Image (spheres, rainbow, N blue to C red):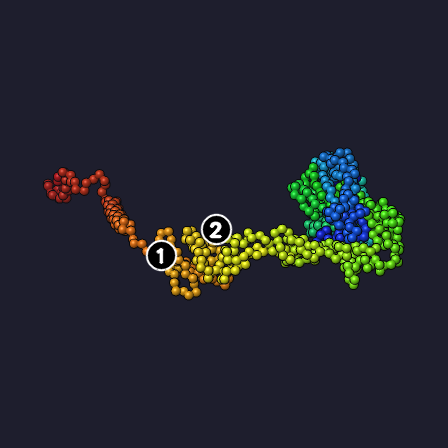
Amino acid sequence: MPRAPAPLYACLLGLCALLPRLAGLNICTSGSATSCEECLLIHPKCAWCSKEDFGSPRSITSRCDLRANLVKNGCGGEIESPASSFHVLRSLPLSSKGSGSAGWDVIQMTPQEIAVNLRPGDKTTFQLQVRQVEDYPVDLYYLMDLSLSMKDDLDNIRSLGTKLAEEMRKLTSNFRLGFGSFVDKDISPFSYTAPRYQTNPCIGYKLFPNCVPSFGFRHLLPLTDRVDSFNEEVRKQRVSRNRDAPEGGFDAVLQAAVCKDYPSLALLGEKLAENNINLIFAVTKNHYMLYKNFTALIPGTTVEILDGDSKNIIQLIINAYNSIRSKVELSVWDQPEDLNLFFTATCQDGVSYPGQRKCEGLKIGDTASFEVSLEARSCPSRHTEHVFALRPVGFRDSLEVGVTYNCTCGCSVGLEPNSARCNGSGTYVCGLCECSPGYLGTRCECQDGENQSVYQNLCREAEGKPLCSGRGDCSCNQCSCFESEFGKIYGPFCECDNFSCARNKGVLCSGHGECHCGECKCHAGYIGDNCNCSTDISTCRGRDGQICSERGHCLCGQCQCTEPGAFGEMCEKCPTCPDACSTKRDCVECLLLHSGKPDNQTCHSLCRDEVITWVDTIVKDDQEAVLCFYKTAKDCVMMFTYVELPSGKSNLTVLREPECGNTPNAMTILLAVVGSILLVGLALLAIWKLLVTIHDRREFAKFQSERSRARYEMASNPLYRKPISTHTVDFTFNKFNKSYNGTVD
C-alpha cells in the first residue's frame, strides 16, 4: 500500500513479421520500391543503396535489397538501413528503504526516462526493474458503509484506529489514517424521499426506529497520524437507512478520490490508477465472488472476506496490505495506436515468462525485472513524437518513454534540384534521378518526343523480335533488363538469364552446375545437359574392388549391367553365370561361423539380399533351384540351393550341418562306454546310500517314539525286585472272649 501522496482505500462492499526472403522470393526486390522511404517500409531487413554508379547500365538493378546483396553487388558504404534504438535519459538507482513522510525521494522503479527511435517493423528492447522498498509510507483511508445493516459492525470498530495503528507500525514507521462514510444517493428509488422520512428514515421500522438522514458521501477526517482523532470520529457516527440493497459504495470511492460522481467501473479503475490508489473490498462471504469479479476491471484491487460483525477487520487489512506488497504489475498509459508492446517478466525464481508483465510472491526488498520490446507498425502521417508511460499498479514511480519514428533516409536531405548528374533535367536524390516533365532515361538524357523508332530498333536482337526480348525497357537506344524474382536477366537485348536451364527433379542444373544463357555449365565431376551425371565410379565399386562385379559399366555413378542374366545394384546377381554359387558361399560360411545369426554385422552385409531357410536335407532334384556345394576344411560337404525372386532377393535354402562321411573314432567310443559304466555305477551307489540313510532315519525315529511313551524313569530298572517283601493278612480271633484284629509279619 504505497503512498505518495495519494491514499489507500478500504471499503466495506501478433501477426508474424514477413520474412525478408521466402522460397524463391526476395520481398525487398519484389516490393517495387521507387524511393528510399518506400524501401524502408517494406521490411526492417530491407536496405537502400544511394551510390550513384550502382548497378550495370545494361540492367536494372534494384537499389532496395537485403544489405548483404547490396554489398555483393558493389554498394559499399552508401547504404541506408536505419535500425530501431533507445537511449536512457534518466536512471536513478533503486532505493533500499523508504524515507521521509511523503516518500517523494524513494525510487522504486528504474530507469525513469527513455527515448526510443523506431523503424517500422524493427523491434527494440530495454530492461526495467521494480522494487518494493522497506518502510515505505502508507496512507489508509477507511470508507465505511453506515447503512442500517452495519449497526453491529459500527460498535466493533470504535477502537479500530488504535489497534490498526499498532499493527501497521510493525510494517512501516510512516502511517496515516483517514475516515469517510457513505449510505446511498439521497434520491428515489435509492433512499426514502417522502417528507416524513427526511429527518428520520427509520420511522416505522420496529427493530430500529431512530437513525440519521440518508446521505451519499461524507469526508469526515483528513489523513492524519493522530489515531485518537480517528477513534473519536468513529464514535460519533450513527447509522442511516436506504431502500435498495446495494449501497452507493462506488460513488463514495470516486468522490473520495477525485470528487466525481456517477462512476462506471472503467472510470473508477482509471482514476484510482491515476492517483496510485489500491482499493480493498472488505465484504461478507456471500458477496465475495461478485467483488472478486470486479478486480479484473479495476487494477490494483484486493477482495477480502469480512466477518458478519467486522471483528476480523484488522487482520483483513493486514492481509490485504501483504497481498498488495507481494506483487508487481506493469500498466501502460497513453499507448500510441501504431505501437506494439511485448513484455517478458523475470521474477524471484529467475525464470523468464514471455507475454507476462506481472510478478507475484515477492517479499519486501525483492526486485522484479521486466524486458519490454517496442515495435512500430507504421509511420505517422507527419513527423511527430509520442510519449507514453509504464507504471507499476499502485506505485507513484513511472517510466516515461518518448517515441520518435525513423521513416526518412539520410540521403534525402541532400537532394539536388536540376542536378548536373541528371543532365540538368531532373532532381538527384539517394542515387536516382527524378526527371523533369518531358525527359526520360536513368540520367534524364533523352527528351520525350524524339525519334523513338530509331531507339527501338537498336533494342531488338533481330528484325521482328520484341523489344529487349520482352524482358526489359528500351531507353535511349539501350536495353535496361528487368529484375526477376527467379534470377538475373542480362545481355545486350536481355536475351540471357541464369534460371532458364534444364532441371533435374526441380533443381536447376541438378545443383551441380551454373546456368549461363540457357545452358548448364557443369561443375567438375559432372556431365550431361542438366549436370545430373556423375563421373565418379566409386559408387560402382563393390567390396571386392571390382567395378560392377565385372558384369557391366559404370554410367553416371550407377552400374549398367551388360552380362546376360546379371542384375542388382552392383550387377552382383546372376543366376545363369557360372560363378553364381561363389557369391552365395560367403553368406553361408558366415552364417555357419556365427551359429546362423544373420544379425551379425558382417553376415548382415553379406546376406542383405538373401532370404535364409534352414533344412535338415537338401532336395537335389528341384528343377527351379540351383544346387551349390563345396568341401569344408574338415572334408565335409556343405550344400545349399538358391532361387532368384522377382523382388531381386534370393531364396537361400541351407543345410543345418555339413554332410561328413568319416568312420567313428574307436577311442572315443571306448571312452564313452567306460564313462557311461562309471556314471551308472556312481548313480547306483548314490541310490543305495540314499535308501540306507532313509531306512536308518526311520528306525531312529521309531526308537525315539517308543522311548517317549515309556512310563518309567530313566534311572529305574523294571526287572529289579527288593529282597524284603511285606504281606498284610486280615484276621479275627477270640481270646478271653475278646475279639482282635491284627497283622502278622
Looking at the rendered structure, the kind of residue marked 2 is: Gln
Do callouts 1 and 2 mark residues in contact (Cβ within 8 Å)? Answer: no
Residue nearer the viewer, 69 or 168: 69
Quadrant occupied by the N terminus: top right
> Which residue is label 2 attached to?
601
Relative to 471, does residue 404 appear above or below in the rendering?
above
> Which residue is label 1 attached to?
659
Q: Residue furthest bottom?
A: 623
Quadrant occupied by the C terminus: top left
Residue nearer the viewer, 66 or 167: 66
Relative to 49, does residue 655 appear above or below in the rendering?
below
Q: Residues within 10 Å of mark 2 (few under 14, many from 20)?
A: few
Q: Position of residue 626 (x, y in %)?
A: 43, 62
Looking at the rendered structure, the kind of residue marked 1 is: Glu
* Distance CA(mark 1)–CA(mark 2): 27 Å
Relative to 571, does residue 12 appear above or below in the rendering?
above
Residue nearer the viewer, 524 or 90: 524
